[in-house]
Amino acid sequence: MGRVLGASALLSAAAWIAMPVAAQSFLNVQTDPAIPTLEEVAGHAPGDEISTVTEALDYMDALAEAAPERMKVTRYAESWEGRELVYGVISSAQNMARLDEIKSNMARLASGELSTGERSSLINETPAVVWLSYGVHGNEISSTDAGLALAYHLLAAEGDQTVDTILSNTVVVIDPMQNPDGRARFTNAFEAARGIEPFADRYTAEHDEPWPGGRFNHYLFDMNRDWFTLSQPETRGRVASMLEWHPVVVVDAHEMGGDETYFFAPAADPFNPNITEAQKEKQVLIGRNHARWFDERGYDYFTREVFDAFYPGYGDMWPTLGGAIAMTYEQGSARGLSYERSTGDVLTYKQGVEQHFVATLSTAEVVANNQSLFLNDFASYRREAASEARGASDRYFVFDLSDRRWQAEQLGRKLAAQDITVQRLPAGAQACGVRYSDGALVVDRAQPSGKRITTLLSEDTSLPEDFVDEQESRRDRGLNHELYDVTAWSMPLMEGVTSRTCGQVNVSNASMVGADDPVTALTASSAAYGYVVPWSDAGQAKLVLGALDAGLTGRATTEAFTVNGREYPRGSVVFSLAANESSLATTLNGLATAIGAEYVALQSSWVEDGPNYGSDKFVALTMPKVAMAWGEGTSATDAGAARYVLERELGIPVAPIRVGTLPRANLGRYDVLILPDAGRGFEGELGSAGKSAIATFTRNGGVLIGFEGALGALTSGDDKLLSARAETAYLAEEAKRSDDEETPASGLLIESDADYDAVTANQKARPDSVPGVLANVIADTDHWLSSGYEEAVALYQGSTIYRPLNDADGANVFRYAAADELVASGYLWEENRAQLAYKPYLMAEQQGSGMVIAFTQSPVTRAYLDGLNLLLVNAVLFGPAHTR
């Protein structure tokens, strides 16, 4: 093909040729022929082909079978599609013979309770645990083969002092493939597209993955954002495994664009304030060793410029907040076997595999050479995390169980699964100056995971002032900001849970909350009239949906009503005995017990206040039939999150219909059609026929629900389905120009910098893009769509702001709060704060017999906005009831 190899590629090729053919290690060392090579098991040497999921798993097993005294493979999770996730533990035979003791020692070091003498003694006899993770994004392919190559090298290398030291002083855990479903999707697409030889042309089919690509898992989650959310089985398995081993160093090996070289730590600013200086210093120590290895081999690299350490959901940040030194490594990706860079040289898959191999080997080497230092720092971090919180005025977080009880219980279990002690106060207990009639959950920051607690539960995590100043300066200079992800993630806010902090809580009567504890149901005695399900949180919604799916008949109220002195809020659902089979009570009891939900017996149809059950204020419910636009043009992560939340968290099956198929699909068989967040190409993929099909569905009585970017297709064209308009950036009066662009501009004097800025201002620019903040939104409590809410917290990111609907067109069911009350958590540019105030978050507009429900921001992002799940159910369940 006449390709030109770069210097590092030529060095890689030379090193490979110089090795003994049977060795198949990237380093020129003597190897043990009893250890099988990748070629013997999979039919190709490392980097010559992209190992499939099956080949990777088979090779890990083959290595463990060949050297059982030095390697053990553990199955730690199963993907949605039934593929195994494994990790291999590699160390010396002496260490492997006492793995249980090593785990126990690491747990004791992590406890923060040892005396100085006990800790010193334990460190002397305990190898440090190093966790090397590869391929969390399935199309970031080279890292998995690098992990396999490293496992081989550690087992097969003979007479190598570096390997001997690593095996003696560390336990190396290799997780070679964090996302097998995504990798399988990539390798299948690659094999389907390849021909007689690989092409380096980046535009050929083998480099051009079809939607949704291999990056994501089955439900299209970016699992490098899922660590504290724990929504996916792969993440839950990894977190549980890490807590079993307590690694002191963690690597998360990724890929980036093919024109890039290699990135390793130190990370970029901003650093989360709960990261210590000692942790930052260890990143530098490890980075310096990488630089030595890379310099010897002529590899290019960079550090500090990108990939920050702020958001706690990354695969490097979550372990960091538990005391580890955790880092992201990024290799320029061939996205196949070869890739022609913009410089003209060709990046090979083998080169990517080799560089990840070297970087992760270098990591283990540093830890092995500094075993006591890393263990001591880990233990110190854990001890200090507990001690620093003692005496703090915000030492305790307390979650009220009388408000969104099920959400609070779920939050407690998520925290308990993350090495966080959660305790339960009994009903009537007092804490933080409040009496909790239904009890409360308490989290004490004075524990070894205290810094993780502070990060996840605090209302706000502040960005460093100097970093903020620089970002504002960059904006003033017309440059992009350097924030890599959202600036807010407070779990109580996202769950919609009432949280308080204080310095003292009496926990003498408290009990422990376990990650797998069932939520206690509040079941009812026998009833003479029927049962009511209070509409308060997602657990109650799950109960109603489960009941409807089981064939029960219920009616939801649009106005609150009172029975026996208790007020049941808007949205509460009544299941009468007359409208249901005799098994009503048994069915509700079984569902409520499994979910942990509440239902209440009604002895009479009489209400003390509000509408009676026969009023038109009650609407009949049926289990909704839901379809979703799927495929090209839609956001893969948003489509996946929406489907996951509806199916796995709420129990509503979703029929995915490809965008291009919508014009010929029988949409009339569904009650609801969801358009997830979408990019600029969505309208083109949808086409006029698709838009016409959606309009017909809606006007014939369907409920059309649009998220974020998909609203562009609903607000454009001659036949709009939504009357709202997206705004451009706000410009001061002096910056607004009225010259007709079709005629020559009138003369103009420019006398100052301000005048110049006004003249050159882009009249059509969108507001500045926001990385992500948690914003307060206010409900229109007269609208049924806001049932269960008076206010909420939503994620705002990007740059889209819509004008409110006119009352004649529809309803602004939720609007953003006033500017001074808008931000619940995070950092928001002042211009955006001013412009976003009072603008709509959720709109509803009648179209014929149907309805358009428009979320200006997605309510399902990363499946971590659980406090909005009830709002999504309002749209999906109550929408059809009001258009039927």
Image (cartoon, grey):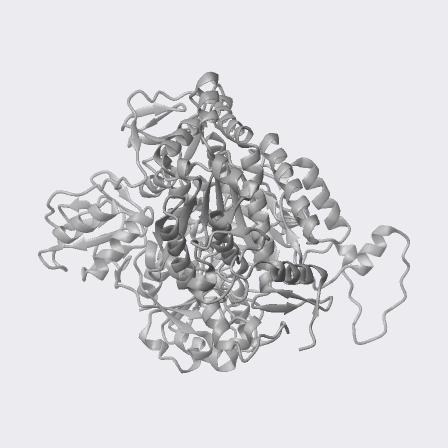
Relative depth, front residue between 63 and 635 = 63
Give the image location of residue 455, x and y in percent.
50, 36
Q: Position of residue 743 (x, y in %)?
A: 83, 75
Left or right, residue 85 beside residue 21: left
431 relative to 220, above or below: above
Q: With respect to residue 74, does 875 lie above or below? A: below
Q: Residue 390: image x %, image y %? A: 47, 20
**Res 299 → quadrant:** bottom right
Q: Residue at x 48, y 82 (%)?
A: 689
In percent of width and height, residue 587 lies at 15, 53
Question: Is 833 situated left or right of 390 in this image?
Answer: right
| Residue at image location 39% in from the left, 43% down from the top | 241
Answer left or right for 446 relative to 80. right
Q: Which corner quadrant holds the N terminus?
A: bottom right
269 to the left or right of 839: right
Depth check: 777 or 385 in front?
Answer: 385
**Vertical relation: 324 (above or below) 79:** above
Q: Nearer the viewer, residue 388 or 15?
A: 15
**How many marks do you count on the picture?**
0
Whether residue 782 is visible to the viewer of this picture, yes or no, is no
Image quarter hosting the C terminus: bottom left
Let me know if residue 440 appears in the view: yes
Front-most of 158 and 836? Answer: 158
